[in-house]
Image (spheres, helix red, strand yellow):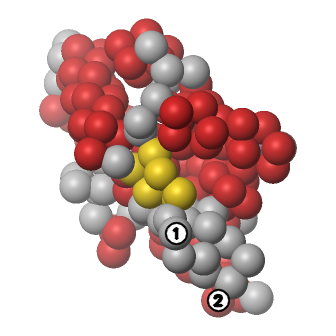
Amino acid sequence: MLAMTAASELSASAVATVLTLGQHDGQSISDLASVTGLSHSATVRLVDRLASDGLVQRSTQKQGRHVPIFLTYEGRAAYQNLRSHQSGFLDDLLADLSQEDKDNLERILERLLSKLTTSRAARDHICRNCDEGICEQASCPVEMTYLQTVARG
């Protein structure tokens, strides 16, 4: 997260919001507050700041009581920039590992992420850091754990 905040000059909460909307445009303030861990009022202020910076816009179409928030063209470019920095950071971090080490790390991370998935908010909090172009939902340990949790009731 630090690499992305430094590269983008956005706060950690703004990065989290852009990453979330980059994957799932149309989130409400309540949804974004849940993912970022901010209060409702702090999320409103954050969205106001991002809107004044030209990164997000509120929809003119309400969905019930909620107003969907969308990335603008500039917001989409910021999202791509964040993903690019994240990918470069991870590539550099893992460069010295053998393929066997990478495979072992992947298995360990899948187990750890599964244990961290205790609710929808936890799932969304974790998944905002994933590149959904790489992580396939059908085999995602976080998504599978969440769906099992929902199925159990």
Image coordinates of residue 85 in percent, x first then y, are 28, 23
Q: Amino acid at mark 2?
A: Ala
Residue at the spot x=72%, y=43% of the render? 43
Using residue 30 as the reference point, say whether residue 71 is left or right of it: left
The residue closer to the viewer here, 40 or 114, is 40
| Front-most of residues 108 and 39 | 39
Q: Is residue 28 above or below residue 50?
A: below
Tell me the quadrant of the picture where the C terminus can be found: bottom right
Element under disc 2: helix
At 23% from the left edge and 15% from the top edge, which residue is drawn?
92
- Return the residue at label 1: 60
Mark 2 = which residue? 151
Q: Position of residue 69 (x, y in %)?
A: 52, 58
Residue 44 location, quadrant:
top right
Residue drawn 81% across and 49% down? 40
On the question of residue 54 being in view, the answer is yes
How many numbered dots are placed on residues in this image?
Answer: 2
Q: Earlier in the sequence, mark 2 or mark 1?
A: 1
- The kind of secondary structure element at disc 1 is loop
